[in-house]
């Protein structure tokens, strides 16, 4: 089964090389889709092995797939498939000398995220996350406009600061293990209790590592790169960055938290993550109220959802199944919405909400999936985001964090009102009789990935087997028991 660990790294890497060297428009167009399918297939295969045999699949101390990493690999593949397949028209629009590099960078981006979730060493995990910064920096600036290049530079500078801080934290965690019998960067070894790690170094290293990875996951106050990068990148790239890059950084925080919990207990990072989560919700609420750009609206929504996930991570094991369900649901919905936003931008020619009116009457082929996906994003049942949010809030109450979840709930209500108002402004109403129009029922791109994403998000929370079992097993991994 070791080939399932190599496949999500090797296939995208091979396709990236072919995109750069073979002059084939079809290859460049479909190679990111094939890379996503390879990652998803490997993730599902590893999940089936974990559920059937238990334990983990590993290649030495290099790669390791337990229930959590197999689940995250499947999330990367699923969100990647929706983003690249749904955004195939955007890929097709990338022509000329940049077409090959665009497809190659997308495949490398997928390979780097796969490596980040499969690495057993937290040092290798850091290197993989740094590799995502390099790939996405070029993708954010793909349009070569002044604003996209400015967003790319901002992302590079702030992202590099974040990963540098995380590297310092990882060095300190390694230093904490030097006086033990086995100095190591292996997450599996470091998360075992009784190893004898230096508590002071683990405290400092854990704080710095979480602060650094929080920058990559878009948590306030380290979030300022996110709205510019997500709004200026091509739609499939925005979908991937919002849907999985932020979650992969959150996955790194989960791994670091397991190490610190084993040495100094959960209270230190619980406070840190709760403050970061509430700040993120406050930033999102205050800026969504006056938002005028629908791509930036989705970007600030990402900050909101990452903030609530961070609070869930801080709550601990009681909320982790809901957090993991949240990761997949948010990823699929956000990929769907960014793909649709790219189609709307192409057709309407503007990202300004005030200039995109009466969409449901004029362009039902785009407005209907947009409305359904926005309903899921805002948190309406039966979509999984609703159940994930309820799970985090009830878990917070049960562990004595009522004040934190009450504050989060108030901010969520403000965000709910803001997103509802903006969505209604884009979609509802009819043009005046003096402005004749032709009804456009075209989806302006593949419908199937959008439908699959919405159906999966609407039904996933009701599937006890194998989804429920997998989430429980992934949570037990973070408790250091698997």
Image (cartoon, rainbow, N blue to C red):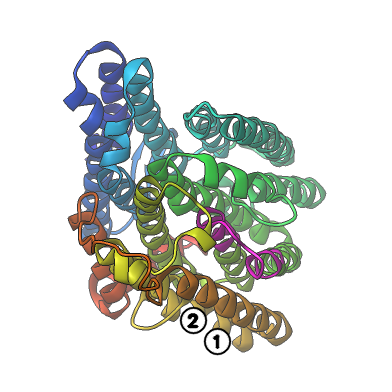
Q: Looking at this view, name the residue that lies furthest to the front.
A: 434
* Front-most of residues 203 and 113: 113
Circle 2 is placed at which residue position? 391
Report the residue at 24% width, 63% height from top.
365
Report the residue at 75% width, 62% height from top.
272
Tell me the distance, in whole angstroms, between the alpha carbons under discs 2 and 1: 5 Å
Residue 52 relative to residue 270: left or right: left
* Front-most of residues 303 and 256: 303
* Front-most of residues 221 and 470: 221
- Quadrant where the C terminus sits is bottom left
Across and down, in percent, residue 125 comes to 52, 38
Report the residue at 49% width, 72% height from top.
425
Across and down, in percent, residue 152 comes to 60, 32
Q: Are marks 2 and 1 in contact (CB under 8 Å)?
A: yes
Is residue 57 among what the camera can see?
A: yes
Is residue 66 among what the camera can see?
A: no
Circle 1 is placed at which residue position? 394
Q: In the structure shown, which secondary structural element does the residue marked by tag 1 occupy?
A: helix
* Front-most of residues 92 and 325: 92
Mark carried by residue 118: none
Residue 91 relative to residue 170: left or right: left
As displayed, is residue 393 above or below residue 52? below
How packed is label 2: few (under 14 Cα within 10 Å), some, or many (20 or more)?
Answer: many
Q: Which segment is the magenta one?
A: 283-303
Magenta stretch: residue 201 in it?
A: no
**Label total for image:** 2
As displayed, is residue 253 above or below residue 148? below
- Which SS type dominates the magenta stretch? helix
Report the residue at 39% width, 29% height from top.
108
- Quadrant where the N terminus sits is top left
How packed is label 1: few (under 14 Cα within 10 Å), some, or many (20 or more)?
Answer: some
Q: Looking at this view, name the residue that lies furthest to the right.
A: 200
């Amino acid at each position: 089964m070791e080939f399932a660990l190599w496949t999500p790294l090797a296939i995208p890497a091979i396709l990236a090389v072919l995109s750069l060297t073979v002059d084939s428009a079809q290859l460049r167009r479909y190679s990111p889709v094939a890379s996503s399918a390879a990652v998803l297939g490997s993730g599902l295969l590893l999940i089936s092995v974990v559920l059937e045999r238990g334990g983990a699949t590993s290649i030495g101390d290099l790669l390791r797939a337990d229930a959590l990493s197999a689940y995250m690999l499947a999330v990367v593949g699923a969100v990647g498939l929706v983003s690249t397949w749904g955004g195939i028209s955007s890929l097709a629009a990338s022509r000329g000398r940049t077409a090959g590099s665009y497809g190659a960078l997308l495949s490398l981006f997928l390979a780097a995220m796969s490596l980040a979730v499969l690495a057993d060493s937290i040092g290798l995990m850091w290197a993989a996350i740094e590799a995502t910064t390099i790939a996405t920096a070029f993708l954010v600036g793909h349009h070569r406009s002044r604003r996209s290049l400015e967003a790319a530079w901002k992302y590079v500078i702030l992202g590099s600061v974040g990963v540098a801080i995380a590297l310092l934290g990882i060095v300190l965690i390694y230093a904490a293990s030097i006086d033990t019998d086995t100095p190591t960067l292996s997450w599996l070894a470091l998360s075992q209790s009784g190893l004898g790690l230096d508590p002071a170094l683990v405290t400092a290293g854990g704080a710095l590592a979480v602060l650094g990875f929080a920058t990559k996951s878009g948590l306030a106050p380290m979030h300022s790169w996110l709205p510019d990068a997500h709004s200026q990148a091509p739609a499939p790239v925005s979908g991937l960055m919002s849907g999985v890059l932020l979650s992969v950084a959150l996955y790194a925080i989960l791994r670091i938290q397991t190490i610190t919990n084993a040495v100094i207990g959960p209270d230190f990072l619980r406070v840190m993550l709760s403050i970061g989560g509430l700040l993120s919700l406050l930033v999102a609420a205050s800026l969504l109220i006056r938002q005028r750009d629908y791509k930036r609206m989705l970007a600030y929504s990402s900050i909101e959802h990452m903030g609530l996930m961070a609070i869930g991570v801080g709550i601990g094991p009681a909320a982790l199944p809901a957090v993991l369900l949240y990761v997949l649901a948010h990823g699929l919905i956000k990929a769907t919405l960014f793909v649709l936003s790219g189609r709307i931008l192409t057709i309407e020619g503007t990202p300004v909400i005030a200039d995109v009116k009466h969409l449901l009457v004029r362009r039902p082929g785009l407005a209907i999936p947009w409305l359904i996906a926005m309903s899921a994003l805002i948190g309406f049942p039966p979509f999984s985001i609703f159940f994930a949010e309820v799970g985090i809030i009830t878990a917070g109450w049960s562990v004595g964090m009522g004040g934190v979840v009450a504050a989060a709930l108030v901010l969520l209500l403000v965000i709910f009102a803001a997103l509802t108002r903006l969505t209604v402004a884009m979609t509802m109403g009819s043009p005046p009789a003096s402005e004749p129009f032709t009804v456009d029922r075209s989806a302006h791109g593949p419908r199937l990935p959008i439908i699959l994403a919405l159906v999966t998000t609407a039904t996933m929370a009701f599937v006890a087997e194998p989804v429920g079992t997998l989430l429980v097993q992934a949570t037990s991994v973070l408790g250091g028991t698997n």
